[in-house]
Image: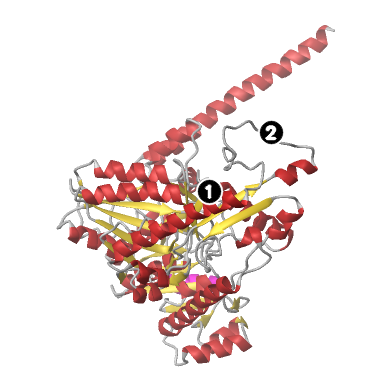
Amino acid sequence: MKPFFKEVLKSLAVSTVSTVVFALLAFVVLGAVISALLSEKEVSVEKDSFLVLNLSMNLTERPNGFRLDDLTRQALTSQGQPPQFHLLEVIRALDKASGDEKIKGVFIEGSFAPSGYGCGYQTILELIDALKFFKESGKMVIGFCHSPSQLDYLVYSVCDELHMHPSGTFLLNGLASEGFFIGETLEKYGVGMQVVKTGEYKGAVEPLTSTGYSEENREQIKRVLDLRWKHFLGSIVANRSMSASIEDLNGSLSRDFFLDSAQALERGLVDFVSPYDRLIDILAERGRTNKDSKEFSRVSLLKYVDRSASDPRAEKVFSSDKKVAVVYVEGAIVDGRIDDGLSAGGNEIAARVREIRNDSDFKALVLRVNSPGGSVSGSDVILSEIRRARKDGLPVVVSMGSVAASGGYWISTESDRIFAGEQTITGSIGVFGLLPNLKELGSRFGVYWDVVKTHDSSDVMGVSRPKTKEEIEVIGDYVAGIYERFLELVAKSRLKEVSQIEEIARGRVWLGEDALQNGLIDEFGGLVNAIEHAARSADLKRYEVVEYPRVETSLEVFSKAFGMDPPKGSLPLGSSDPGFDGLLRSFDKVFGRLRGLNDPRHAYALLPWYSGSFGF
């Protein structure tokens, strides 16, 4: 028996010592990593280097903090999950590179990894504007693609010189908006859905009540798709300086939309067919060879971005006690204090506006909206705080991103000026009420509800029973009242009569070019234009731009990580997969929307069929 216990104790001792040694080594390594990451060192850039813009990212509107995985990857490896950048920091980096004598040009590669509300069409157009601004410095933009998506190619088309891998392909087959409808499914499972809505174009509830698009909804979606595809083709023709017209290119692609590299070269979509190793040699010839890697000298976007900087035009703006705030509203608007890039809580956004209003250093506010709307209650909380900020003399400028519809337009009404892109999806001025009940579903499984109440309708907001005809009429009047208020908000903001707004409302969606003609926005422009206008409105020459949510420092990220408080805004990357996984993702998307419907009065101003890059 003694030898047995000796062996057990020996094994235990070895395990304990090994664990302690491993922990000490891990602590030393982690300490070294943290020390390296937290030291504020200037990025070393060799002369004649290329700034590498790898499109394998999720390009969002709002900052997501200096994420822990970004920091680790930056310190240890260039591999791993694609990073997440926000638009303004990429614009800053390109602007900085245009004046950096050590940067020879920009090299573009990779393919976007959209997630959530990232990589929206208008966001990508503002990235392209930044690339065009960079080209004005006389520096080159060179691209290498393998099998780009249509959204990828929109960026690649700006390149002065575009190379394609010999085995690459193009799929330029137009745009489609595929809806997922579970109305019949809910009915079969005994889930009742009662709906009240305003406007025949307000198709927000269709995925939950129907088996397909209504004619009105199909009409507006078709117009958006047609206008967007025309814009896409027009951008390609202009960026590539093609002799073919938009109509010629469209006709050609409708007949032959799947192209190999040789066909792409013949059509003028690319300049060269080159393997990647050949392109590396070309870039080394154009720039210089790095003595360590023996390849072209480069600096990655992740290393080049300055997440402590505060403005896209650094040479014009200095650190100052005069500040312009940029508040991001990205994602569906809900009640509460959440803000993760998928949902924007009305109370959270309002608290940020209130903080800015109470700080005398802030002289102007830019509201960047990338939201399909959502809760009326959440939207109204934001609007009230913006109204008070304006009353206190703070200029408020709205910058619409890829989408600012329904509740996203509601919160934009209380502003001094509205900027949007030609391809911004906006409007959808309408309201609906969604009243689910689970009575039949519960009874099928032996689940029942009972209630004691003071009035017949005391439980009207519950899910245990369908609403009576009289209750639906009362709720319908409430929803109609919200719609009338929405119309009045827009009419007052746009200096029009309510009857004029009603003609372009009815829940109808408009692209930016239509919105400008209809008077729903003031002018075309991106986030940078809105910031500059806000600064002029406050008569600022020297100012600092502060973003909300702000980008966290490395130390804050590590503090949260070790405090078991994970960084907010970390979104899963990757597009939808086909087959069964794609079906599961569709279900998750629909039920995810249901989870976000948390308005206390079940009233919503929401555009549900918008998703990310819409159509791409």
* Residue 90 location, quadrant: bottom left
Residue 297 lies, in percent from the top left, at: 41, 63
Q: Amino acid at mark 2?
A: Asp
Residue sticking out furthest to the right: 1
Q: In the shown orientation, is residue 12 left or right of residue 600?
A: right
Residue 535 lies, in percent from the top left, at: 20, 58
Q: Is residue 308 visible?
A: no
Q: In the shown orientation, is residue 522 left or right of residue 8?
A: left
Q: In the shown orientation, is residue 127 left or right of residue 190?
A: left
Label number found at residue 450: 2
Q: Residues within 10 Å of mark 1 (few under 14, many from 20)?
A: some
- Give the camera-side residue of 234 and 444: 444
325 shown above or below 177: above
485 shown above or below 261: above
Q: Which residue corresponds to the image point at 57% horizontal and 37% vertical from the top-left?
A: 458
Looking at the image, tell me whether mark 1 or mark 2 is earlier in sequence order: 2
Q: Secondary structure at mark 2?
A: loop
Give yes or no for contact between labels 1 and 2 (Cβ–Cβ under 8 Å).
no
- Give the camera-side residue of 316 and 80: 316
Q: Which residue corresponds to the image point at 60% horizontal and 77% vertical from the top-left?
A: 171
Q: Secondary structure at mark 1?
A: loop
Q: Which residue is mark 1?
A: 602
- Give the camera-side residue of 197 and 152: 197
Q: Which residue corresponds to the image point at 54% horizontal and 57% vertical from the top-left?
A: 115
- Give the camera-side residue of 598 and 240: 598
Magenta-colored stretch includes residue 281 = yes
Q: Nearer the viewer, mark 1 or mark 2?
A: 2
- The segment highlighted magenta reads 276-285
